[in-house]
Image: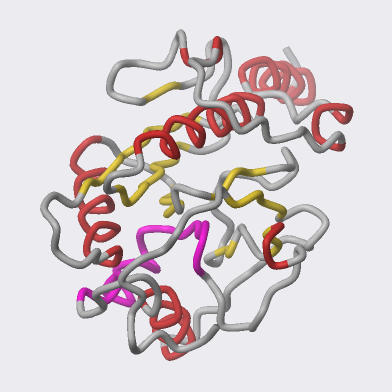
Amino acid sequence: MTKSSSEEALQNIITQYKCPPLCRKTAVERFQAALQPAPSPALKDVSQGGTWSPEGCVARQRIAITIPFRDRQKHLDILVYNLVPVLKRQEVAFGVFVVEQFGNSTFNKGRLMNIGFTEARKYDEFDCFIFHDIDLIPEDDRNMYTCSEKPRHMSPAVDVLSYTSPYMALVGGVLSIKAEHFFKINGYSNIYWGWGAEDDDMFYKLSASKITVLRPPFTIGRYKMIKYDRKDVSPIRLYF
């Protein structure tokens, strides 16, 4: 076998076992986020521990999704119902880590996300870590649940904000980041109690470390927000 034919054979093997790109029709058509908590058929082959990987090919990335949680089971059901089919269509191997805060103390989302990151690393060697608010439902398959070379704010366009970003320092909602960057900035701050501020603090920690935050176009990074009456808003929240 000549060198060229050997290289061609090797490329055929790699192509055979590499996950195919998203179907153009699936990728372009923005699906309607049906806000219903009923069990989805897409959950049948997801393990009891919340993990899944595609069969017959190598996943694009292995991602760990951390969801801070307390007293919002219905919203968690709705998110999982809508999110899992997207992840499967994108052919990523994933693990979902729901980190719950017990008791009636003021909510501390930063601590929960740090715990999720730490526990996920004990479970597997993930390529990418995604921190996901429980009330944001993705609308577009082209918004890839993977990590880029730099952290990516995946949710710049939310329906309740007229699909625009109120300020450039916003990285809350859905954020994908590699472990190396998370370690470099020492994760989220643990000092913020109440809703807000920890995400704004994260942006300035990234900026101080000269780490640029990427964002998808507003036409792709679109999410629907489940209505919820936020309590315990942080008195030191930086913006809006």
Percent across and percent down for residue 48 are 29, 17
Q: Is residue 216 above or below residue 73?
A: below
Percent across and percent down for residue 222 are 72, 53
Q: Residue at x 87, y 30 (%)?
A: 24
Looking at the rendering, in which quadrant would you find the C terminus? Answer: bottom right
Q: Is residue 124 above or below residue 117?
A: above
In depth, the one of 202 and 90 nearer the eye is: 202
Percent across and percent down for residue 115 are 20, 55
Q: Residue at x 34, y 16 (%)?
A: 47
Rendered image quadrant of residue 9: top right
In magenta segment, residue 189: yes
Looking at the rendering, in which quadrant would you find the N terminus? Answer: top right
Q: Is residue 137 above or below residue 44?
A: below
In magenta segment, residue 188: yes
Q: Is residue 47 above or below residue 82?
A: above
Instruction: Left or right? Give the position of 201 relative to 146.
Output: left
Instruction: Left or right? Give the position of 178 relative to 153.
Output: left
Chain part drawn in magenta: 172-190
